Amino acid sequence: MTTVRPGTEADFEVAVAVWQESDTARRGRPAAPEVEEIVRSRLGLPGTWLTVAERDGQVVGVTFAQPARADDGAGEEIPGLCHLSMVFVLPAHWGHGVGAALLDATLAEATRRGYLSIQLWTHEDNERSQRLYTRRGFAREGRTKIADADGGLIGIWSRAL
C-alpha cells in the first residue's frame, strides 16, 4: 500500500536520490552534476513543497511544487499559477499507481494553497508521464523548448484546479 505525506527538509536527500534513480532509468544515463545542483537548490525555496510516497517505510516517489514564475521561472511569481517541478517514482514502482497518488495529493495541496491552475514541463519523449498527466486532466499547451539541463525537447502542460 502506498502512503502519501507532506515531505520535510529531512526528506530532501532521499528526494534527490529518487530523482536520480528515476531520471537515470528513463534517460539511460545519469544527469550532469549541475542538474543535481539545480534540483537541490529548488527544494528549500520559499513557497515550495515536497510530497512523498512511501511503501513499507521506503520513499518510492516524490513530487515538488512551487509558485510559477514569468519568463520560464526567471521572473516574478504569477499569481494563481502553481508550477509542478518534478514527479519521480523509483523504477521498481512504475505502473503501480504511485505517480497517480502523488499527483492527486499535489493537486489537492495546490488547491488548498489557493492556486487556480497548475503547469509543468515534461520531455516530449516521456510517454509514461504524459499518460499520467492526461488522465489527471492536463493538456499540452503547444509550446516546446530545449531543456537547459539536458538539451532534450520539453513541452508545457497545464490544467485548471
Image (cartoon, helix red, strand yellow):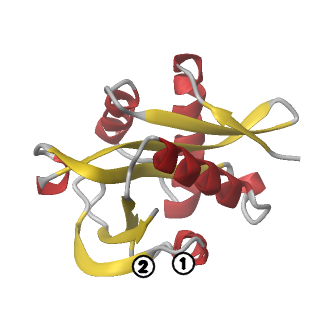
C-beta proximity under 8 Å, tags 2 and 1: yes
Name the one closer to the observer, 79 or 9: 79
- For marks 2 and 1, give the CA distance: 6 Å
Image location (x, y in percent) of residue 139: 42, 79
Please tell me whether mark 2 sits on a helix, a strand or a loop: strand
Please tell me whether mark 1 sits on a helix, a strand or a loop: helix
Image location (x, y in percent) of residue 94: 72, 60
Q: Residues within 10 Å of mark 1 (few under 14, many from 20)?
A: some
Identify the image quadrant of residue 56: top right
The tally of labels here is 2
Relative to 123, residue 15 above or below: above
Could you tell me which residue is drawn at 65 percent across and 57 percent down? 99
Identify the image quadrant of residue 158: bottom left
Kind of residue indicated by mark 2: Ala
Dot 2 corresponds to which residue?
A: 139
Could you tell me which residue is drawn at 42 percent across and 70 percent down? 159
Kind of residue indicated by mark 1: Thr
Dot 1 corresponds to which residue?
A: 134
Identify the image quadrant of residue 46: top left
Could you tell me which residue is drawn at 56 percent across and 22 percent down? 8
Image location (x, y in percent) of residue 132: 60, 71
Farthest residue in the top direction?
10
Drawn side of residue 120 relative to residue 138, left or right: left
Name the one closer to the observer, 60 or 17: 60
2 or 1: tag closer to the N-terminus: 1
Relative to 51, residue 147 above or below: below
